[in-house]
Amino acid sequence: MAILMGCYFGQDYLAAQLDSIQAQSYRLWKVWAADDGSTDATPELLERYQASWGRDRLAVRRGPQQGFVANFLALVCDDGIQADYFAYSDQDDVWAPEKLANAVAWLASVPAGIPALYCSRTRLFKGARTVGCSPRHRRPPSFANALVQNIAGGNTMVFNRAARRLLAHAGPDVKVVAHDWWTYIVVTACGGQVHFDEQMTVDYRQHEDNQIGAGNGWAFLVRRIEGFFNARFRCWVDGNLVALERLGACLSPESKRIFALFSAARKGGLSARLSGLLRSGVHRQTAGGNCGLLIAALFNRI
């Protein structure tokens, strides 16, 4: 198991995350930590843990210093990192002891040649208080969902070598908004399997320095609505679709059909946008989300 950790000014929380990795019941892991230019105590903290654990448990490298997405994609696309399974790790969470064991138990049930992605719900905490949890999802993971929504945080994601090969094939320089959403898109686009575990395997720390933060609450809803109407969401989708073109030959026949219908709908007039969206089957997880998607299509914002 290669644990791919992006670090940036993480001195306040990094030790708790590393300690929770050390406490995993699944023991066959190595952390690859990429520090993206921190000038606080993060590099020294990583060095101390490396001295304690050994280089066979913790490798430390410099990130590309082009943002958190580039940092994670540089790790996942690095041929020098080899493993049967790969897990994304933020620097500021706390993993449940069974997180990796749960992921490996499911991933091992999938034939090795099929791309597979495990992800889960999270418990949200701030300080010593639990402030919520990520939602359950009513509909199964799918490419038709992934085109317009990510269902899980990267801090919960674990995937197999077949999935990693696809991500590496697309390359570290794809212009996508988030590495975790991109991973969900790639696996579902290429005929892979996704398991969303309703058990909460990560305590997801909420603080003012979160790169993204949890997708819950009224504040998030307001940001999402604003994103639809100021064209930010459309720009995100643009980036994902352009990136997917690098994997054209790898897409399943059904994914190619959905991709073509959705792409055509986005370029059409009002009637074509609405009918094309419905024919493509592209959807979000909730009724409210799908209403928002239709409204966004109405105003040419998907």
Image (cartoon, rainbow, N blue to C red):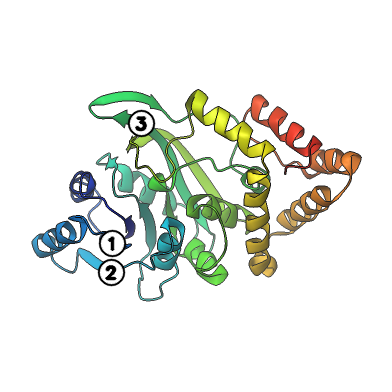
Q: Residue at x 62, y 34 (%)?
A: 226
Quote the CA–CA distance across marks 1 and 3.
Answer: 24 Å
Of all residues, the one furthest to the bottom in this rendering is 80
In this view, the residue in front, 160 or 234, is 234
Q: Tell me the CA gap for discs 3 and 2.
A: 30 Å
Establish if 122 lies above or below 34. Answer: above
* Residue behind mark 3: 123
Coordinates of residue 119 in the picture (x, y in percent): 44, 44
Image height of 42 relative to 299, above or below: below
Q: Is residue 107 left or right of residue 181?
A: left
- Where residue 56 appears, x then y in whole percent? 19, 68
Q: Residue at x 41, y 46 (%)?
A: 211
Of tags 1 and 3, which is closer to the observer? Answer: 1
Q: Which residue is mark 1?
A: 33
Q: For the residue labelled by badge 3, is the local secondary structure a helix, a strand or a loop? A: strand
Q: Residue at x 35, y 71 (%)?
A: 81
Can residue 1 be seen at all in this image of the molecule? no
How many numbered discs sit on the rendered protein?
Answer: 3
Amino acid carrying mark 3 in the image: Arg
Bin the neighbour count of mark 2 within 10 Å (Cα to Cα): few under 14, some 14-19, many 20 and up: some
Residue denoted by label 2: 61
Identify the image quadrant of residue 133: top left
The numbered mark, 1 or 3, whose residue comes first in the sequence reads 1
What is the quadrant of the C terminus in the image?
A: top right
Task: Tell me whether circle 1 and circle 2 mark residues in contact (CB < 8 Å).
Answer: yes
Occupied quadrant, residue 142:
top right
Above or below, 253 relative to 26: below
